[in-house]
Amino acid sequence: MANIKSAIKRVRINEEARNHNQSFKTEMRSSIKRVEELVNQKNEEDAKAALKEATQNIDKAVQKGIIHKNNGNRKKAALAKKINELGA
């Protein structure tokens, strides 16, 4: 454990930030899994609706700096590709 006052504060703030970011990350992952499940069930219409929600969650995580911009774009492209293959 840290001994210096500023280090103790930094540990506390980092823990609070980690907990705050965790909820956004969890929501993002859940929405991605929802899209993948719908694609596996070959449910194109619901998958497109879920993709819209997942895209919003990914964009929110990127905006808040939880994930990198390129990582977010890669996730969105992979989901869109799965849905496009479903329609073809």
Image: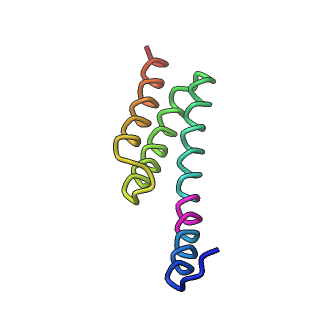
| Residue drawn 49% across the image and 19% down it | 86
Give the magenta range: 17-22
Q: Looking at the picture, does residue 21 appear above or below residue 38?
A: below
Residue sitting at the far top: 88
Which quadrant is the C terminus positioned in? Answer: top left
Q: Looking at the picture, does residue 82 appear above or below residue 2?
A: above
Which quadrant is the N terminus positioned in? Answer: bottom right
| Residue drawn 39% across the image and 35% down it | 74
The spot of residue 20 in percent (x, y) is: 55, 66
Res 40 → quadrant: top right
Residue placed most toward the observer, 35 or 48: 35
Q: Look at the image and say whether residue 21 sits in the magenta stretch.
A: yes
The number of callouts visible is 0
Residue placed most toward the observer, 55 or 11: 11
Res 5 → quadrant: bottom right
Q: Look at the image and say whether residue 3 sits in the magenta stretch.
A: no
Q: Looking at the picture, does residue 16 appear above or below residue 85?
A: below
Prevalent SS, magenta region: helix
Residue sitting at the far front: 3
The spot of residue 12 in percent (x, y) is: 57, 76
The spot of residue 50 in percent (x, y) is: 52, 39
Residue placed most toward the observer, 38 or 15: 15
In the image, taking residue 74 as reference, residue 44 lies left or right, namely: right
